[in-house]
Image (tube, rainbow, N blue to C red):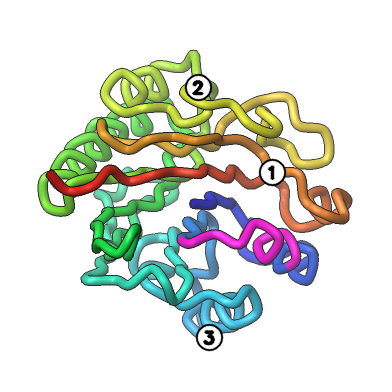
Amino acid sequence: MLSYNVRSLRDDTAALVRVVRACAPDVLCVQEAPRFAGWLGRAARLARATGLLYVAGGAPSCGTLILAAPRAVPERAEAVAWPRAPGLHRRGLAVAVFRFLAGGEPRRLAVASCHLSLDAAERRAQGGLLLNRAAELAEEAGHAVVAGDLNERPGGRTFRLLSGRLTDARRAAPEGGEHTFPAPAPDRRIDAVLCTPGVEVLGCGVPAVPGAADLRRATDHLPVLARLRLPPRP
């Protein structure tokens, strides 16, 4: 699972593609995906370049997007647009339920790509909406993962609200780098992967990739790579 804020593909897209390919994720949760005129074509080109498939999101989910490898089979997908606050950028979720084949047995996982508000009060409200949706998705699929740009450090109120109910994958199994922003000289962790109970975290953090300069050129955030394991069905 990879989470990545791509700043509307305004930077070095070739470097971005190389980073994603080096990480080889089953599922890629994107924030600040193309969302204006021609967004679907740009999302499709990004998917093709990275060897992934478009699954959900883009303009209908206010710039959140999910791409996936062919081995992650989507059972359904949806775009969620949260209420608009006057004067603030509208936010939303890209959501998909996947079926994976592990050990010869199909396992299901729901995934939501999120990008929370810069405004603290709105971000707190969105944290509550996100928890509610994660609980609904876990009930539907058995397990759920939320990944994205939280626009807040782990000590913030919304981050603490989320990590009080969901597993902060980085805290559970640190691996690789910690800080995700700004990419040229990262000094804070504002991007995260959060899991419902039962998802085993094998490792989570900013990945080391060949050609480390690509991480600085690709966009203004660093990606978060989480290695996860789904338990067998009871």
Q: Is mark 1 on a helix, strand or loop?
A: loop
Residue 90 in view (yes/no): no
The numbered mark, 2 or 1, whose residue comes first in the sequence reads 2
Q: What element carries label 2?
A: helix
Q: Where is residue 148 in the image (x, y as percent from the top left)?
A: 47, 44
Q: Mark 1 belongs to which amino acid? A: Pro
Which of the 4 image quarters holds residue 21?
Answer: bottom right
| Residue bearing the label numbered 3 | 41
Which disc number belongs to residue 207? 1
For the image, the number of numbered tags is: 3
Residue 31 in view (yes/no): yes
Say if the magenta span includes residue 24: yes
Q: Position of residue 162 (x, y in %)?
A: 33, 26
What is the C-alpha distance between the residues marked 2 and 1? 15 Å
Q: Mark 2 belongs to which amino acid? A: Arg
Region of the chain picked out in magenta, as a range: 18-26
What is the C-alpha distance between the residues marked 2 and 3? 37 Å
Which disc number belongs to residue 171? 2
Note whether 35 is above or below 141 in the view shown: below
